[in-house]
Image (tube, helix red, strand yellow):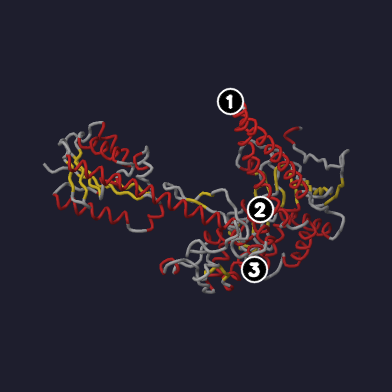
Amino acid sequence: MTQPAWIYARFSSMEQSKGHSLERQLTEGRALIERMGWEHSPNRELADEGKSAYTGGNRSEGSLLFDFEQKAREGLFHNGAVLAVENLDRLTRQGYEQAVDLLRLLTTNGVTVATWHDNQIYEAGKRIDMMKVMSIILKAELAREESEKKSIRIRASWSKKIEDAQNGDKRAMTKTLLAWLKRDDETLLMSVIPERAAVVNEIYDWYISGRGLPWIVQRLNVRKEPSWAIGARNKGQGWNTAYLHKILTNRAVLGEFEPMSRPRAALHEVTKGIVIPDYFPKIVSAEKFNQVQQLRAQRSSWGGQATKTMNNLMSGLAKCATCGGNMYFESQQKAGRTTGHKSRLDGRPLTYLAKTDRSYYRCNSARRGHTCTNKTRIRYEMLEGAILDCMFDLAMKDTTFKPSDAEAKLNLSIGEVQRSITLKQDQIKQGSDNLLEFFSKSLAQRVAQLEAGLEADEAQLATLTKQLEIERGALRPEEDTSLLLAARNALNSEDKEDRYLARVQTHQSLTRLIDQMYCNSRGETNITLNNSDVQIHIAPDGRTSLLVHEGPDGEREWNPDHEAAE
């Protein structure tokens, strides 16, 4: 009776998925099954991708070999089955004990194991010949030792390269470099490819000016800018937003090198927790990089049709005073569009050309019939004009905005964490010295707790330091107000692109300058500004009034009329 046959294929790391290992194993397995006259089915092809036989990942829960073993234990193959595999080391590389035990598990439960590389068949229900056992032992041990030596050798090699880089060695570690760098084959030193570094800076400048990633991609592809992909097939696909995202977030443009590792079963790399500054040649200024990071965080809520035209300058800013939720931008009429309606006299269809835009702000929760009771609609065009007029006037006053205190607060936090680190280091040293003189379990536990706390403090310090770098690259209030004034004339430009860029720039400046913006059920809008004691009140008819308020301690106090609490 023809036996059903399964093919088992495997490779250790996800990097190997880029090659042809899997397809080769499956093709050779199908050939063996056809040659032996066993029954083949695509449903019985098992492929464990990125599963290591050295660590046992391919036999752990969640792998296909694990499931196959479980079925064998449960007796599902007592009527006969075949497992075809390239070599026994595809099943396990953990030593001869594991290899023999696995082979016995399968053959005693109805599974014949066939390896096509060495043309061996271990028949189900039959005792394994002693010579075959010896061969299995020898091959399994050689495979385990090979994997162990390879693993140790690779780790040691990379550890040595990273240690050298930390000590100032700037030689390239591999032939594959960042796309804007090249390597001298004799000295192994890296240098910048000028034209590519220029493109990187151009991408940064475009993004800062208000361009979105899709626009930048289109611009690069339209002008036939050669992509930096490796391989003819990938080069033909041109630029894409995913690659631009990597360029705009990769601190390697600042010269930093952060060694990464990829666990065998993982799709993505993880950091080793080491950062080596000034390893790569620097091609982007820290100010430019940090400004882009701030803009990316600011634009994280962008999306949808509205951001393509930037009709809503207060996107992400306007909140409902009743529930605290977002205000919804509702466009009812666009200037220049033909609108149809019926005559009230006789019902005849009539059309007219809209002369103005007509849009409204309304609470999104109330609009959806949820819990909010604020059903008031505020005319957007009136509100935008009032806010811009007021902001333009304030921007021309030197005393409106104060320097941002975010940098000072971060410096204070960094100082506190550094003091905590120093204190823990002293305590750990003292505790370790005491342990050398007299061992105490409680003291050892205390030292371990201090070491865990020190690790957490160091991680917090690294985070705060990066935040400080980004804050130092941020625009100051006076710079934002200058940009706001510069964009003023272009806000209503007849040139579509100029108008869009001006509105993007205005939106970015408003997002940094405005702290809170609440619209209440009386049709009023109340705004507080960052780094300023000025508050803006806009009446339902668009009239504005300014208030300057300081609390008893000099801190601004303002509750934006949360009506739900009234």
| Nearer-N-terminus badge (3/1) | 1
> Disc 3 vs disc 1: Cβ atoms closer than 8 Å?
no
Badge 2 element: helix
Picture layout, residue 427 above or below residue 47? above
- The answer to whether residue 344 is above or below residue 76 is below
Q: Secondary structure at mark 1?
A: helix
Answer few, some or many: residues within 10 Å of disc 2's Cα (few below 14, many 20 plus, some between 14 and 19).
Answer: some
Q: Residues within 10 Å of mark 3 (few under 14, many from 20)?
A: few
Question: Compared to 322, does 231 lie above or below?
Answer: below
Residue at disc 3, secondary structure: helix
Residue bearing mark 3: 497
Q: Amino acid at mark 1?
A: Lys
Real-space Cα separation, disc 3 to disc 1, in angstroms: 70 Å
The spot of residue 483 in percent (x, y) is 75, 63
Nearer-N-terminus badge (1/2): 2
Instruction: Tell me: residue 472, above or below residue 192.
Output: above
Asked if one can make out residue 340 in the rendered structure from this viewpoint, the answer is no
Q: Residue furthest front?
A: 437
| Front residue of this view, candidates 79 and 309 | 79
**407 with respect to 177 (left or right):** right
Name the residue: 60% across, 53% down.
Answer: 275
Residue with the mark numbered 2: 298
Nearest to the eye among marks 3 and 1: give it. Answer: 1
The percent coordinates of residue 434 (x first, y second) are: 65, 30
* Residue named by callout 1: 441
Tell me which numbered mark, 3 or 2, is placed earlier along the sequence. 2
